[in-house]
Image (tube, rainbow, N blue to C red):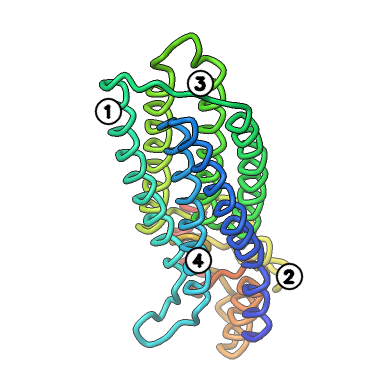
Amino acid sequence: MHKELSKQILSSKRPAYIEGWLSIIINTLLFGIKLWAGIVSKSVALVADAWHTLSDSISSIIVLVGVKWSEKPADEEHPFGHGRAELIAGIIIGVLLGVIAFNFLFNAIHNLIDKNKVTFGTFAIVVTIISIILKEAIAQYAFWGAKKINSVMLKADAWHHRSDAISSVIILIGIFLHSYFWWIDGVMGILVSIFIGYTAFSISKESMSSLLGKRVSPEIIRKVKELAREECKKDLRLHHFHGHQYGDHIEISFHIILPDTILLKEAHSIVKRIKTRILHDMNIQSTIQIEPEKGAHSLMHDQ
């Protein structure tokens, strides 16, 4: 059973591996092209966007390392496994974005003070459009993968890609307006920096919230009740639920009510079947407490 479950978990991580390698390859190529276009046109916004793109490659390396680390089985020092590695990776991605945002905000303001002018050509326009299309495509795949495997880390990387696509849209607007306003590149650079900074804050906030442990959703509790009742074909009157979730790892405990006359061996068998079914179908570790039917009604207020 545990070997089969391990294979399922490994298979479920495949979207993260695919997204990570695609991101590294595509973003590294885009970085070189965008940096070249930015240097040729002397655009601080385009250069900032190029480095933002390279940071996507770095964050994707962090994703791959985080996924690999999170797959390590539980050991004596980490009895609940290494699932929080993904959340730590998400925080690192957020901090990385924050540093990039501050750096480019400083450069954009400096360019405005010095009144630096830029000269955009067709090459810069084509590169920016290609970047928008590719980055949004990767973002869509990453969002899909994050939802499929319930990964905060992959969702953070998806927002990293989307922030790059949006910053490229802002730069494209600036390219078409630069002939009318000399200051447009500096302003676009500031807007890109602010957007990157907001993305960094959102990613870090969500990752830290999950790291501290989130409340289990009512939908998960409903599903657990269904599985327990299907497995035992009895009205177990499940109640007193307590859950803890961080990333894709969930621990849950609850009480069930069984007849006073039931044998201990049979009660143990019922609990074991329920726990095995929940683990197999939902990949959730559960702790179940048995209550006798008589005197249990007063404890059912939270059913």
Mark closest to the chain's N terminus, 1 or 2: 1
Disc assigned to residue 249: 4
Give above or below for 271 relative to 105.
Answer: below
* Dot 2 amino acid type: Lys
Q: CA distance from mark 4 to mark 2?
A: 28 Å
Relative horizontal placement of residue 169, taking residue 196 as reference (left or right)? right
For marks 4 and 1, give the one nearer the viewer: 1
* Dot 3 amino acid type: Gly
Mark closest to the chain's N terminus, 4 or 2: 2
Residue marked by disc 3: 174
* Dot 1 amino acid type: His
Mark closest to the chain's N terminus, 2 or 3: 3
Q: Residues within 10 Å of mark 1 (few under 14, many from 20)?
A: some
For marks 2 and 3, give the one nearer the viewer: 3
Q: CA distance from mark 1 to mark 2?
A: 71 Å
**Disc 3 on helix, strand or loop?**
helix
**Disc 2 on helix, strand or loop?**
loop
Q: Residues within 10 Å of mark 3 (few under 14, many from 20)?
A: many
Q: CA distance from mark 4 to mark 3?
A: 44 Å
Disc assigned to residue 233: 2
Mark closest to the chain's N terminus, 3 or 1: 1
For marks 1 and 2, give the one nearer the viewer: 1
